[in-house]
Image (cartoon, helix red, strand yellow):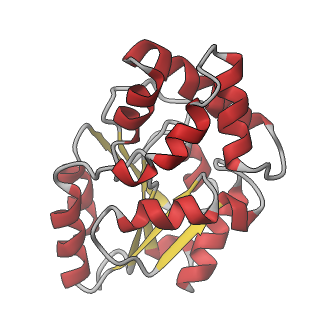
Amino acid sequence: MARYDAVMFDLLTALLDSWTLWNSVAGGEAPGLRWRRRYLDLTYGCGTYRPYEELVAEAAAETGMASGAAAALAVRWGELAPWPEAPGLLAGLRQRGLKLAVATNCSRPLGCQAAARVGVTFDAVVTSEEAGFYKPRAEVYQAALAALGMPPHRVLFVAGSASDVPGAAGVGMDVVWHNRAGLAPRDDARPLLMADRLGPLLAVAE
């Protein structure tokens, strides 16, 4: 029997190159990184869900972005692009009969728009808005598992950030980490496998 019945993904980092868009709106890599890091700090510390767009705007103001930066990011959301290998690899997983899902830290409208940019139909798209919390809170992963109707041990999670590794593992999923940027791990959690491309990671699902 196959090890897994489904693969669940972080959306905005594991499957999509959201960094390029944030940096473009910010006017460069350094200000984009500062903005994004502050936004992540706000999501990790906010407790129950606060509107994604509100947190993005708050982070922009606190890091010296232009007043319209958050609105510009939302307007340009349709420019999000998948990592080059993502659509073909997901299509291959689908052909092998695996279900596909995403669990993402954003609002429902932006999450659905971003998922459509991958070019593959997902069986479940769950956002932090619906779950009522931001990852790495367990509620987001649990909501996505419920949407799939599967137990955690039958679902492989592909993390896009360091925090996703202990977050997804904490609810019982095996985790691999698409660490495109070579980030340091958080806590003591370690994935089954870490790589800077999706191909080696998704071989685990075979």
Q: Residue at x 18, y 53 (%)?
A: 199
| Residue 160 horizontal/vertical position (percent) | 43, 44
Q: Residue at x 63, y 13 (%)?
A: 64
Residue furthest to the right in view is 48
Residue furthest to the front in view is 68
Image quadrant holding the N terminus, namely bottom left
Q: Residue at x 75, y 55 (%)?
A: 133
| Residue 191 horizontal/vertical position (percent) | 42, 45
Q: Is residue 28 left or right of residue 57?
A: left
Image quadrant holding the C terminus, namely bottom left
Can residue 150 be spotted in the picture?
no
| Residue 172 horizontal/vertical position (percent) | 58, 63
Number of numbered discs on residues: 0
**Of residues 123 and 31, the one drawn nearer to the viewer in this rendering:** 31
| Residue 167 horizontal/vertical position (percent) | 61, 49
Q: Residue at x 31, y 63 (%)?
A: 118
**Of residues 142 and 191, the one drawn nearer to the viewer in this rendering:** 142
**Of residues 62 and 75, the one drawn nearer to the viewer in this rendering:** 75
Q: Is residue 29 left or right of residue 206?
A: right
* Residue 24, quarter of picture: top left
* Residue 44, quarter of picture: top right
Residue 174, relative to residue 192: is it above or below?
A: below
* Residue 146, quarter of picture: bottom right
Q: Is residue 126 left or right of residue 61?
A: left
Can residue 52 be spotted in the picture?
yes
Q: Is residue 84 left or right of residue 165?
A: left
Residue 54, relative to residue 90: is it above or below?
A: above
